[in-house]
Image: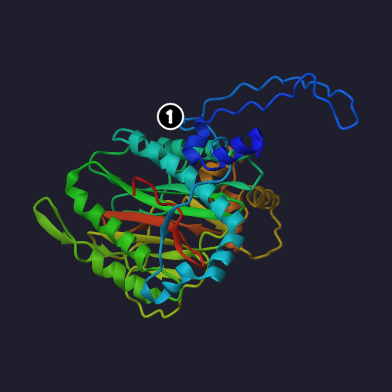
Amino acid sequence: MTDTEKVEEKIENLSLEDKKDEVAEKPAETPANATTDDGKKKKKKKNKKKAKKIDLSEQTEPPTIPVTRFYQKFPAGEIMDYGEDNLWRTTDEEKRYLDRMKDDNLNDLRRAAEVHRQVRNYAHKYIKPGLRMIDICETIENACRNLLDAKDNDLSSGLAFPCGCSLNNCAAHYTPNAGDETVLQYDDVCKIDFGTQINGQIIDCAFTVHFNPTYDNLINAVKDATNTGVKAAGIDVRLTDVGEAIQEVMESYEVEINGKTYPVKPIRNLSGHSLGTYRIHNSKSVPIVKNGDNTKMEENEHFAIETFGSTGKGYVHDDMECSHYMRNENHVSLRLAKAKSLLNTINRNFGTLAFCKRYLDRLGETKYTMALNHLVENGLVDPYPPLCDIHGSYTAQFEHTIVLRPACKEVISRGEDY
């Protein structure tokens, strides 16, 4: 074995963390008097000037360095064996072979997940009372763009949907529009929900921020319920069974607010969902209550397991000004020139992924309200207004993305935080 091969073997056996600190070995020099088989002297190779090594051992704060500068192959999420009924999949050689064939998609997912982890780790430290909600969202979104190395008019990497920051009784789909001066308060319960994607492989992951310990039990209930849903999910598992497991755990909690005790209720008309390529909501819904849906989860499917708990009715309705929109597959002939132009912008920058009005502002679109309404009225774009429980109630959310690999279940978005 040559010296170079020994060095390569040594580097191959190092962990990803060790590889960051590994100093490149200098190749062995050819002796000046070495000869070739025909008796001619070999020319001594000149050492090429090495490029300056950049220290990427730690990410910046706020995060700005693309994650591809840290890794070539990205770390796996949490690996979980299937339950007793499917335990054979973990050791079956054919299933392990099929698992390896999906490596490209998995690396894209893991890259998107690493971005999500690094950004939310910063968000945990950054978010505090007194910040404007619009600043919180744009800080998170810009960090994602930097770490993804995302470009406008390029759908190969970027945000999967706008950063949600729904407050208190609002459970989902709130992000500030331009001019919204809402400020985060000490007593707020804020759901931070953002997504990343590489080549259409989506990470959908969310957590809840709170400062007042009064709401600890609400947050713990929903976090516990989400982890229960992750454990219950698997190949050939019925969707209703996942919902039943989630419901049982969440309803075992209660929270005391201002001397009054409230049961924590699952928000029964919200659910998790399967994920497709460039599709945030694919064909299957994962309930958070028992609902009798006997549809089964299948091998190689991706799911966003998310749960919502509430101190209110446990039922949400449309409320407040709409900010979220998403292109659908309808094809309609448009007469309004501005609507045609706006649709082209949407297709180039978002495709079938969700967007918000701030994203249109960022791209330089102006006076687009009538054109956007025209697209909605003609069924080309769907609005997704904020979803709220009764006023005075509090809601919480946690969410993870999982992949039902042939031989194991991978919680792609799992991190040290949750």
* Place of residue 129 in the rendered image (x, y in percent of width and height, measured from the top left): 28, 35
SS under mark 1: loop
Q: Is residue 26 visible?
A: yes
- In this image, 367 relative to 161: left or right? right
Quadrant in which the N terminus is drawn: top right
* Place of residue 261 in the rendered image (x, y in percent of width and height, measured from the top left): 12, 58
The type of colouring in the image is rainbow
Q: Is residue 356 visible?
A: no
Tell me which amino acid carries mark 1: Glu
| Furthest-left residue in this view | 259
In this rendering, the answer to whether 190 lies above or below 330 is above
- Exactly how many numbered labels are in the figure? 1
Is the residue marked by circle 1 packed among few (<14), some (14-19), or many (20+) residues within 10 Å? Answer: few
Q: Residue at x 18, y 45 (%)?
A: 213
Report which residue position mark 1 lands on.
61
* Place of residue 411 in the rendered image (x, y in percent of width and height, measured from the top left): 43, 57
* Place of residue 81 in the rendered image (x, y in percent of width and height, measured from the top left): 40, 65
In this orientation, which residue lies closer to the viewer: 16 or 106? 16
Q: Residue at x 46, y 54 (%)?
A: 412
Q: Residue at x 10, y 56 (%)?
A: 260
